[in-house]
């Protein structure tokens, strides 16, 4: 059974973060530069929330706000479920599906360890299936 720590060990635990006073436009630039769909909002070493492209479209564009005046603290999602490195990929898939979310913050001892996305979960699921197929193929052909 695969766990969140398996994803973090492959992709790295570094989550790109910005300060809560960062403008939405600057946060979008950071996302574009890093080819990611979200940034973590941190004040010093304290996790406050996450801003996603979805937050931008729903909380800025659709509400007629300005990206250069709006701070990420105004649109961040701070109520995402928290997961731990030892949680299973299946648990994450259930959480994401039932809550209709694409990102989960990973915490260990109250410290942010990283962020996993639905893409990470799907890739890990596919990897597990490929390993199972390889194992079965090896068993059948031996």
Image: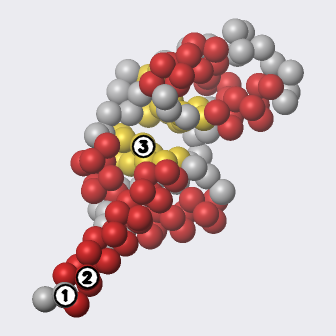
> Label 1, label 2: how many angstroms apart (C-alpha)?
6 Å
Q: Residue at x 77, y 25 (%)?
A: 60
Which of the two discs, 2 and 3, labels the residue nearer the N terminus?
3
Residue 128 sits above or below residue 27 on the image: below
Looking at the image, the residue that sits furthest to the left is 142
Q: Residue at x 34, y 57 (%)?
A: 4
- Image location (x, y in percent) of residue 82: 46, 52
- Image location (x, y in percent) of residue 115: 42, 43
Looking at the rendering, which quadrant does residue 16 occupy? top left
Residue ID for mark 2:
137
Residue 109 lies left or right of residue 17; in this view the side is left
Return the residue nearer the eye: 43 or 12: 12
Residue 119 lies left or right of residue 28; in this view the side is left
Which of the two discs, 1 and 3, labels the residue nearer the N terminus?
3
State the SS at label 3: strand
Q: Which mark is residue 141?
A: 1
Q: Residue at x 50, y 32 (%)?
A: 36
Residue ID for mark 3:
115
Label 3: few (<14), some (14–19) or many (≥20) C-alpha neighbours in 10 Å:
many
Looking at the rendering, which quadrant does residue 21 occupy? top right
Check if mark 1's residue and mark 2's residue have beta carbons within 8 Å. Answer: yes
């Amino acid at each position: 059974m695969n766990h969140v720590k398996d994803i973090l060990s492959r992709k790295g635990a570094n989550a790109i973060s910005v300060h809560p006073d960062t403008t939405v436009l600057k946060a979008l630039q950071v996302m574009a530069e890093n080819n990611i769909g979200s940034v973590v909002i941190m004040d010093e070493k304290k996790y406050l929330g996450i801003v996603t492209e979805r937050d931008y479209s729903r909380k800025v564009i659709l509400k007629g706000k300005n990206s250069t005046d709006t701070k990420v603290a105004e649109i961040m999602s701070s109520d995402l479920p928290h997961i731990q490195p030892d949680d299973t990929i299946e648990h994450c898939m259930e959480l994401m599906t039932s809550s209709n979310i694409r990102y989960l913050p990973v915490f260990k001892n109250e410290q942010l360890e990283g962020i996993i996305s639905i893409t990470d979960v799907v890739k890990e699921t596919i990897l597990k299936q490929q390993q199972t197929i390889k194992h079965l193929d090896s068993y059948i052909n031996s």
